[in-house]
Image (cartoon, rainbow, N blue to C red):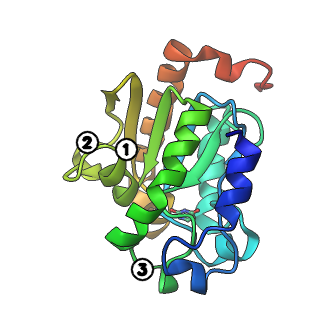
Amino acid sequence: MDFETLKAQCLECSRCALAQTRTNVVFGTGVPTARVMFIGEGPGQHEDEEGLPFVGRSGKLLDQYLEAIDLDRNKNIFIANIVKCRPPQNRDPLPEEWEACMPWLREQFRLIRPKIIVCLGRIAAQRMIRADFSVTKEHGVFIEKNGVLFMGTLHPAALLRNPRQKPVAFEDFVALREKILEVCPETYDGVERD
Ligand code: URA
């Protein structure tokens, strides 16, 4: 299956109850050949309305961190979520919701074949890395699983709530830049730097 077919099928998904309350499926955005992927938790209100990930306030902050390390959602990364439809009132996704949704993300991994996966926040890190992963204690550490490097960092929404954590999160992005230069420097081919 190619990426566009996967997207078309995903946009029609009704595998869990979130299909009944969503406005749009948020499939993900970016470059399907990217070596670096970012995984969030699930769409919020703005994402649900626009059908795109991280377009609200936390998305703006994420874009600033990305820009600081020469990453750009339209040029050299792909951004997706653990669940592709908005949980009502932005509650945490239920196990049956992320289990139903996981095959879409797995297909995205299979087609994109990222070398580095950055998990934004606890929900994504615990689903992708380890059920007892602690973002507070283990953020910024690269963990290899089946030839892919995973890293968990603080969710941008958490940084908006607690701005004192911003420098710590920024260090994770600096470490990410170093890791990209080491394992997939082609990420930076053709991206203008200041
Ligand atoms: N928070 C997330 O985890 N994902 C989004 O797409 C937006 C906000």
The quadrant where residue 123 appears: bottom left
Q: Is residue 89 above or below residue 60?
A: below
Residue topped by disc 2: 138
Q: Earlier in the sequence, mark 3 or mark 1?
A: 3
Quarter of the image with the C terminus in it: top right
Residue topped by disc 1: 152
**Horizontal relation, residue 160 to residue 9: left or right:** left
* Residue count near mark 3 (Cα–Cα under 10 Å), binned few <14, some 14–19, many ≥20: few
**Horizontal relation, residue 61 to residue 152: left or right:** right
The quadrant where residue 190 appears: top right
- Residue extending furthest toward the left: 132
**Residue closer to the observer: 57 or 9:** 9
Between marks 2 and 1, how big is the CA–CA gap? 7 Å
Residue topped by disc 3: 91
* Residue count near mark 1 (Cα–Cα under 10 Å), binned few <14, some 14–19, many ≥20: many
Can residue 73 be seen here? no
Q: Are marks 2 and 1 in contact (CB under 8 Å)?
A: yes
Q: Secondary structure at mark 1?
A: strand
Q: What residue lies at 51% left-to-right and 70% top-to-bottom?
A: 15
> Which amino acid type corresponds to the residue marked 2 in the rendered image?
Glu
Q: What residue lies at 74% left-to-right and 48% top-to-bottom?
A: 5
